[in-house]
Image: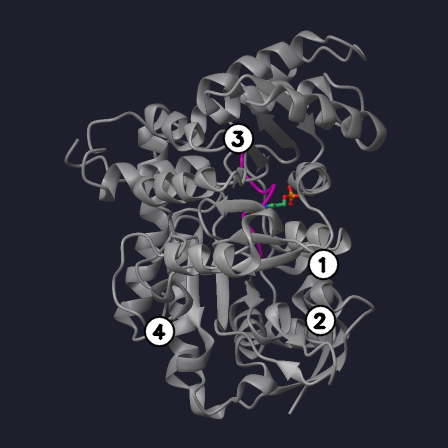
Amino acid sequence: MKYMTAEPFRIKMVEPIKKTTKEQRQQWLKEAQYNVFKIRAENVYIDCITDSGTSAMSQNQWSAMFQGDESYAGCSSFYRLQESVQDVFGMPFVQPTHQGRAADYIMAKIYCRPGTYAIGNMHFDTFRGNAEILGATPVDYAIDEGQDPTSDYHPFKGNIDLEKMEQLIKTKGPENICVVIITVTCNNNGGQPVSMQNIREVSELAGKHGIPVVIDAARLAENAYFIQQREPGYENKSIKEITREMFSYCETATMSSKKDGLVNIGGLFVTRNEDVYLQANQLAIVHEGFITYGGMSGRDMDALAVGLQEACDPQYLEYRIGQAKYLGDLLKARGVPIIEPTGGHGVYVDGRRFFPHIPQHEFPSQRLVCALYEEAGVRAVELGACAFGSKDKETGEPIWPKLETMRIALSRRVYTNSHLEVIANALGDIYENRDQYRGMKLVYEGPILALRHFTAGFELL
Ligand SMILES: *Cc1c(COP(=O)(O)O)cnc(C)c1O
């Protein structure tokens, strides 16, 4: 397959995208208070704000949708989905939900108790929100290499630090740790994978103390591919053998199907514990819908049943992970500082090293997001001072996060390598002119601090 390095699909249907002028984009940025969440998607040339729900579906997924069974109870679409999920997860009980955060909510409601701690590598913000509402404290214990954007190559920067985990169990007592959540891959620090060894050891340590383990599995196939490529002993295993082993170490998994489900909407709550399943059914009925649809239409479940299988295809994964690396390599060639190695679903630019003269309280990564949109109509997202900044509960003093990045998220099967070249060229040029940029001032936050990046307003300094 020496020459077959291009995208492993051809395009049968196209969606036009609009070219715009810099003057127009400057105007739209101003109207959006320099928050790209408030820009109309039609005014974006290349949209890398997220990889969530933005996948292009295959011809097999579209045809599966025509078989959708929209019966309220016991529809055949559910059984097709259940079979596909059991095949990939190796777990018996499947409760669909309308999105990942609904599965997070059900999971938090079942596992979190007031006054307890939830250990994770880096908790996803929707779980963090749900846990906090239920009175539990989420703690992030990704290994040090994973929390330092300048750290050298490490194959599994999403790993949990076992020593820190053991220390917390000791000091707080195992009865006060309600759950351990392993997010694969770890989104917040670059889509970095978690090794099988780490999943196994975390599970053993938790099991010794009777603490349940949950896997937040939005990017399960991407994580499995990294294990296959990087972890000794897995090079000859299939992706599904690897995913099944990953889940053999947890009791429950939640999933946002909008990532590796290769669909535009949907979520999953999967477990091997029947009592947990029965509780999840009750919560789903109240909040989502009956057990066999959980807020999904029959046709959407059929698309997901097929999408999950396609996500485990090694040729697809080679292309997928290869795209992030391709963009990362182009950026490195222009000197742009990124988190290395590149992870699964995008490239993360280090805002601190990109704009060393802009202090964190002036939002360097947000400034970069705006510059990239202004110059090239490319929409990325800030994961730094705005998204992860918090405040001291007593003094109200701002607390700035360790990681200060701009994420260029890559939608699945959507953009070609020429789109990625546009992004690399634009960012390379901005980097050459980096001295000309000043920081930003946050002028509006919105009501919920943890979600302010969606609603914030800025001014240019
Ligand atoms: C996207 C995501 C969620 C939330 O899922 P939604 O489908 O957006 O509600 C939870 N966890 C992780 C790791 C995610 O990437």
Q: Give the structural element (helix, strand or loop) at label 4.
A: loop
Residue 175 coordinates in the image, percent (x, y): 60, 47
* Real-space CA distance between mark 4 and mark 2, rounded to the nearest whole angstrom: 28 Å
Report, in whole angstroms, how far the alpha carbon at label 3 lies from the one at label 1: 41 Å
Amino acid at pointer 3: Glu
What secondary structure is the stretch in magenta mostly built from?
A: loop
From the viewer's perspective, is residue 123 above or below residue 300? below
Residue receiving disc 4:
337
**Which residue is depicted at the point 66% across and 53% down?**
116
Q: Measuring 47% from the left and 50% from the top, which residue is drawn there?
A: 410
Instruction: Answer with mark 3 or mark 1, whichever residue precedes in sequence.
Output: 1
In screen coordinates, is 240 left or right of 210?
A: left
Query: Which residue is drawn at the image coordinates 66% and 38% (left, top)?
Result: 107
Place of residue 194 in the rendered image (x, y in percent of width and height, measured from the top left): 37, 47
Q: Is residue 299 magenta?
A: no
Q: Are marks 2 and 3 in contact (CB under 8 Å)?
A: no
The foreground one among 204 and 50 is 204
Mark closer to the observer (3, 1): 3
Circle 3 is placed at which residue position? 251
Q: Mark 4 packing: few (<14 Cα in 10 Å), some, or many (20+)?
A: many
Callout 2 crowding tier (Cα within 10 Å): few <14, some 14–19, many ≥20: many
| Amino acid type of the residue that numbered disc 1 sits on in the rendered structure | Arg
Contact, CB < 8 Å: mark 4 with mark 2? no
Q: Is residue 243 visible?
A: yes
Disc nearer the start of the sequence (3/4): 3
Q: Over which residues does the magenta segment extend? A: 49-56
Label 2: state its secondary structure: helix
**339 to the left or right of 183:** left
Residue contact at pointers 2 and 1, CB within 8 angstroms = yes
Label annotation for residue 100: none
The residue that label 2 is drawn on is: 28
Q: Earlier in the sequence, mark 4 or mark 2?
A: 2
